[in-house]
Image (cartoon, rainbow, N blue to C red):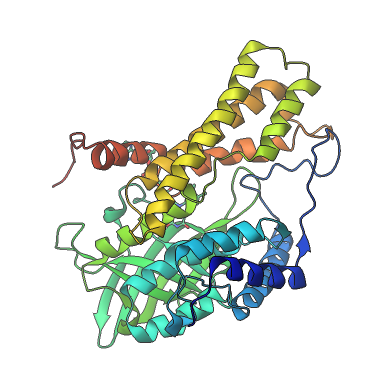
Amino acid sequence: MAAITEADFRAEARAFLDANADKRVERKFQWGEGSDRVGLLEEKTAEEEAVEVAAAKAWKAKEFDAGFGWISGPAEYGGRELTREYERAYREETAGYDIPSQGAFVIGLGMVAPTILAHAIPEVKEKYLRALYRGDLIGCQLFSEPIAGSDLAGIQTKAVRDGDEWVVTGQKVWTSGAQFSDIGEVITRTSPDKPKHKGLTMFVVDMKALGVEVRPLRQMTGGASFNEVFFEEVRIPDSHRLGDVDEGWGVALTTLMNERAAIGGGGSSGVGDYNFTRFKEMARHFGVDDDPNIRQRIASIYINGHVARATAVRSMAKVRAGQAPGPEMSIGKLSMTKNMQLMAQTAAEILGPRLAADTGEWGTFAWAEMVLGVPGGRVAGGTDEIMRNIIGERVLGLPKEPRVEQ
Ligand SMILES: Cc1cc2nc3c(=O)[nH]c(=O)nc-3n(C[C@H](O)[C@H](O)[C@H](O)COP(=O)(O)OP(=O)(O)OC[C@H]3O[C@@H](n4cnc5c(N)ncnc54)[C@H](O)[C@@H]3O)c2cc1C
């Protein structure tokens, strides 16, 4: 593909966006006006979700067909082979427009697709990568099990070879988005006799295959964005194996590093400037804006937010320079969730009982969704404690914590 300067690329992106999306109108926060939904870990009804997924897919297809779907990807799978700087430039351009939420693709594109690109055979890359980046297919991550989360290598879902196929039986849990996913990345145990990290194998599984059953799990926030997934003798072709037999642990690490990059490295601080204004206005509205403790907390939220964002930007600079996401991604994830926790605590302190009972008062009970969602954020993609272990051992080089098994 011919080289294009960043200025020309940005002009092309703006022309595409002008033709297909509305310019974002700057919202000025006014207490009591507009939606009071807090935009963190929102929960949707099944109907709202179906509308959102359809809109997300329609946008993704348009974007892909215009050459903005996979800016840094290889041309043979539909990518444009530009550097990650161009991806950043495109993200900056889109920030000025109202485009449908792309949340449905976070796992498929943030984790599953990079793992397929790194570990699948060419036919499987050909089959799935273009379709994932065009939004024709959505992917999910089938790692956690009822007895294996932080200790992922303890999974028990087994895969047994039968000629050119593998027969998979077991149960996964907390699978985000499985209800609307077409494919999944599943980690299985293929050699139960080997040490636990050594007997694992990863596959791409068709979520519509015979024997796959998805059951929604209701969360305390009211929604059901994740699921239990049962595998009953599900047949997966050997061609859909990611990496070598019994080498799935290394493949899983590719996904986990990309997961932390997707969650904590996106430049997110856990609090946008808009939400920061909400805090200030909430404190003013309830007459606590001169309380030194509240002022201190709100200032901390602002500062932490900017530090988290700077940390994420620094880690992502490495990725843009062509390096794999490293253990420092854990710092971005931990800073973000710590700040979300501080936000939840501060909202709870200001709102008190208004957070527990819906009186219809604007800007009060709406925060319950965010406050109840934060613990999930602190667990998803590796818990705060696991992030601290990774930072201690792999970033700071501190002695390793004692392991139960060798
Ligand atoms: C919103 C959300 C979305 C998710 N989406 C997915 C998904 O799409 N796919 C998927 O596969 N999974 C998903 N998960 C599951 C998630 O990966 C696991 O919940 C997580 O890895 C923790 O595992 P666990 O729940 O089994 O807790 P456990 O591992 O049992 O941990 C329990 C507690 O013990 C602590 N702990 C455990 N080990 C250590 C240690 N070595 N040192 C210090 N403390 C420790 C933990 O920090 C935690 O506080 C999701 C979870 C959430 C909340």
Nearest the camera: 332 or 306? 306
Residue at left offset 43%, top offset 38%? 334
**Residue 210 visible here:** no
The image shows residue 103 at horizontal and vertical percentages of 60, 59
Q: Which residue is drawn at 69% across and 54% down?
A: 44
In the foreground, 281 or 195: 281
**Relative horizontal placement of residue 371, taking residue 402 as reference (left or right):** right
Q: Residue 276 location, x and y as percent? A: 67, 33
Residue 371 placement (x, y as % from top left): 62, 35
Quadrant of the rendered structure where residue 387 is? top left
Location of residue 69 (image quadrant): bottom right
Residue found at x 75% / y 34%? 365
> In this picture, is 142 found above or below 31?
below
Foreground residue among 301 and 13: 13
Describe residue 368's horizontal placement relative to residue 111 as left or right: right
Residue beneath the point at 39% across and 40% down: 331
Q: Is residue 394 above or below residue 143?
A: above
